[in-house]
Amino acid sequence: MRLEEKLDRVLTRAQELEARLSSPDGFASDDFRRLSKELAELTPVVDTVGELRRTRAELAEARALADEGDAEMRALAEEEAAAIEARLPGLERAVMLHLLPRDEADARNAILEVRAGTGGDEAALFATELFAMYQRYAQLHGWRFEVLEVSENEIGGYKEAIATVTGHSVFARMKFESGVHRVQRVPVTEAQGRIHTSAATVAVLPEAEEVDIIINDSDLRIDVFRSSGAGGQHVNTTDSAVRITHLPTGVVVSQQDEKSQHKNRAKAMKILRARLFDLERSRRDTERAADRKSQVGSGDRSERIRTYNFPQGRVTDHRINLTLYKIDKVMTGEALDEIVDALIAEDEAERLATLT
């Protein structure tokens, strides 16, 4: 289908929705909400298409004026035509971006999971720093960052840390962080000053609602046990810790941060629901595009996506070959948006290339 035909269909659909919503005939509240949401999503597209077509009409008028009249009038018309023409590529790109299929999870909150990978204690310390980086990044965006689970080693490094991040379009910006993050530096435990390479894995999952994933009680095995590990005055005092196993998939989630067994179970179910939702999304994505090779936006956690080289003060994202020599600002979350914006732009460019 030609682009102009697609634009006409969008405009026609918006007009149909407006007519239905303004109709005196009543309909179910669920239908009203659904249609209102669809119209709200189409409105920015309609506005941008309208601006694009008005700009094209203005350009045609300016060019017509440039072909007639005296020399002074032609010069003014040509200058105006050039200015209008310069605006067109931006408007056309904006329209194309609106037409791209949306990731239904982009507007969701996220479950963030950071785990130490290869590298022992140094990997755990790096995982701690990554978790803190995302916490500060969330604060800079005005998002809420709630720690769900932290498992520490003997020197205070994180073997595993899980949090929920709540706010506007959280998953849209954080989904590109999924993958293996590699660090190169001299560990604090290294006496001879040698540079070591360690790694931590990051998983960013869209938070699932109960309506997204139906979990049958019969599919769950729930074990309760006494909390153990560093931290928490209630350790080894009551059977408050909860381990939930989803039998059909084998996914296991444990929670022991709260003193209340009920609260631990609720947190564990939130994480379980997000992991199952992510599994379903991955299955559908694989079916839809089994041959897509790009790492950008794929969330492939088996791939090294980024290297943090402290001696050289640089951070390199290998998916887009972007290097920033401002590792301190990246680790405080201040410069992380420079990487995220570049990843989003690359992803959009690749998807635009497939839009016909």
Image (cartoon, rainbow, N blue to C red):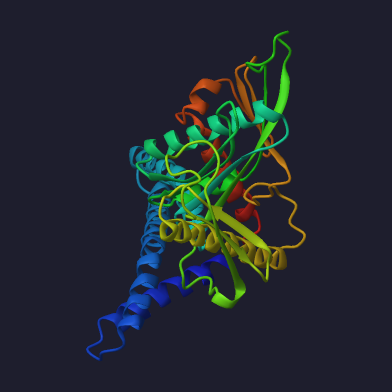
Lateral position of residue 83 relative to residue 326, left or right: left
The relative height of residue 330 versus residue 84 in the rendered view (above or below) is: above
> Which residue is more in the foreground, 247 or 168?
247
> Which residue is more in the foreground, 183 or 218?
218
Q: Position of residue 127 (x, y in %)?
A: 59, 33
Q: Quadrant of the N terminus?
A: bottom right
Seen at 52% across and 67% down, the residue is 4
The relative height of residue 298 versus residue 316 in the rendered view (above or below) is: below
Seen at 55% across and 65% down, the residue is 3
Q: Residue furthest front?
A: 237
Lateral position of residue 257 relative to residue 339, left or right: left
Q: Residue furthest bottom?
A: 25
Residue 107 appears in the picture as rendered: no
Q: Position of residue 267 (x, y in %)?
A: 46, 56
Q: Position of residue 89 (x, y in %)?
A: 50, 48
Seen at 47% across and 55% down, the residue is 240
Q: Position of residue 119 (x, y in %)?
A: 72, 29
Residue 21 appears in the picture as rendered: yes
